[in-house]
Image (spheres, helix red, strand yellow):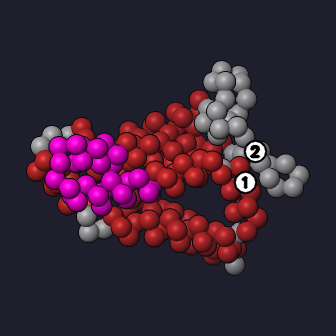
């Protein structure tokens, strides 16, 4: 039964990565490639019908993880609390940027929300890549199943592990360019 739950969570996370990867890519190129308002509108229309539903896969994976593997859920949220809150706020900023962009026709309003959309999409790609780097590297658990790593490290090659260290940032940057 545990293998079935693991496969379900893996399928949900893979579904989110595949479907939201297109939206993240559109957000990243939105500011760099699309120069005119018509091009930016075209980029936003390409993700418009489906971008709202992509976060459902992430929520379903989190809920299933809580239900099927409460120990894993508790230990991962104990150590990754701050990065997960940053990801949550970036997801909120991205959603607000897409929804509020067309509410007021002002020379300040649209560029502000365009920058928010691009910045949140780029940082989400880096943070999800850093999370993948932490999963691949592994996280140290203590005897009670809790782990704590500092968010930042001293960034020396032989320094302590951290949630954002050389390895995880490199994986995050590579996922940004992937």
Does the magenta stretch mainly form a helix, a strand or a loop? helix
In the rendered structure, find residue 148 and report the number of the disc placed on it: 2
**Is residue 15 left or right of 104 when viewed as pictured?**
right
**Farthest residue in the bottom direction?**
1
Is 147 in front, or is 105?
105
The residue indicated by pointer 1 is 78
Q: Is residue 136 visible?
A: no
Report helix, strand or loop for mark 1. Answer: helix
Pointers 1 and 2 in contact (C-beta within 8 Å): yes
* Boundaries of the magenta span: 91-117
* Image position, residue 35 (x, y; %): 15, 40
**Mark 2 Cα-neighbour bin, 10 Å: few <14, some 14–19, many ≥20:** some
Residue 170 magenta-drawn?
Answer: no
Report helix, strand or loop for mark 2. Answer: loop
Mark 1 or 2, nearer chain start: 1
Q: Residue at x 56, y 68 (%)?
A: 61
**Is residue 144 left or right of 79 when viewed as pictured?**
right
Q: Residue at x 24, y 47 (%)?
A: 109
Which part of the image, by quadrant, shows the N terminus? bottom right
Is 39 in front, or is 12?
39
- Number of labels in the image equals 2
**Mark 1 Cα-neighbour bin, 10 Å: few <14, some 14–19, many ≥20:** some
Q: Residue at x 67, y 75 (%)?
A: 67
Q: Is residue 173 visible?
A: yes
* Image position, residue 84 (x, y; %): 58, 52
* Image position, residue 166 (x, y; %): 59, 29
In the rendered structure, find residue 97 and report the number of the disc placed on it: none
Residue 29, picture quadrant: top left
């Amino acid at each position: 039964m545990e293998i079935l739950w693991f496969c379900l969570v893996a399928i949900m996370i893979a579904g989110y990565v595949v479907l939201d990867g297109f939206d993240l890519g559109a957000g990243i190129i939105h500011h760099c490639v699309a120069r005119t308002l018509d091009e930016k509108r075209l980029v936003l229309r390409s993700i418009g019908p489906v971008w709202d539903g992509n976060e459902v896969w992430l929520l379903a994976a989190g809920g299933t993880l809580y239900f099927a593997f409460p120990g894993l859920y508790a230990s991962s949220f104990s150590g990754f609390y701050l990065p997960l809150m940053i990801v949550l706020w970036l997801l909120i900023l991205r959603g607000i940027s897409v929804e509020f962009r067309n509410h007021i026709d002002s020379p300040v309003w649209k560029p502000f929300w365009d920058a928010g959309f691009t910045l949140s999409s780029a940082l989400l790609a880096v943070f999800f890549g850093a999370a993948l780097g932490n999963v691949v590297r592994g996280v140290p658990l203590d005897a009670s199943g809790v782990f704590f790593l500092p968010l930042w490290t001293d960034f020396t090659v032989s320094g302590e592990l951290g949630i954002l260290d050389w390895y995880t940032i490199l994986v995050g940057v590579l996922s940004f360019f992937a």
